[in-house]
Amino acid sequence: MPVRELIIETKIKVFPVDGMPDEYRKLAKAAQEATRNAYAPYSNFNVGSAVLLDNGEIISGNNQENAAYPSGLCAERVALFAANSQYPDSKVLAIAIAAVAKGEQVNLITPCGACRQVLFEVENRYNCPMKVILCGKERIYITESASSLLPLSFDGSDLPK
Ligand code: THU
């Protein structure tokens, strides 16, 4: 018998595409447009991502694959690292993600585990919740923070000082 049972809940708001909150329309469009420039000859899975900064800038990125598979990088990290490298002093307010497979937008794209870890680090770095906007073909899924996508996350606080 366990001593305790912990239940971790995540709130995800789901909107129909035409009912998406106005403040994220431009960001979602940027993520969708970024899928076009993905370099994904191995998976044929084009992912686009767009990051909204507190200075109003939108930085987008897409997946960049490589014949040596692990050398490639996901769209979310391409966009986030580009944003953080160009605007290190700007908080990241939100990230939108979209994906296209076989010419069609997929129903739900969610960040992989490694990207969630990076989103989480960025959220902590700027001490500012990052909205995560998952742009599906029919629905938009929005979480209030990156940490809500990574329960029991590792934030480095136990690393030796
Ligand atoms: N990929 C992303 O770019 N983001 C995700 O959220 C999931 C997966 C990429 C990695 C790889 O280039 C392709 O999609 C197939 O996994």
Image (cartoon, grey):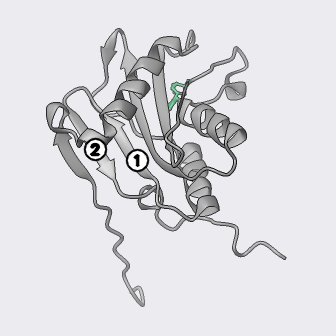
Q: Which mark is residue 66?
A: none
Label 1: element kind: strand
N-term mark: 1 or 2: 1
Residue 144 drawn above or below residue 43: below
Q: CA distance from mark 1 to mark 2?
A: 8 Å
Q: Residues within 10 Å of mark 2 (few under 14, many from 20)?
A: many
Residue 72 drawn above or below residue 9: above
Left or right position of 24 against 50: left
Q: Residue at x 34, y 53 (%)?
A: 143
Label 2: element kind: strand
Is ligand 1 closer than 8 angstroms to the Cβ of mark 1? no
Q: Amino acid at mark 1?
A: Val
Percent x, y of residue 117: 58, 52
Quadrant for the N terminus, please. Answer: bottom left
Question: Which residue, given by chain and number where applicable, does mark 1 sit on?
Answer: 132
Q: Residue at x 15, y 38 (%)?
A: 19
Percent x, y of residue 63: 56, 24
Q: Residue at x 38, y 16 (%)?
A: 101
Q: Which mark is residue 141?
A: 2
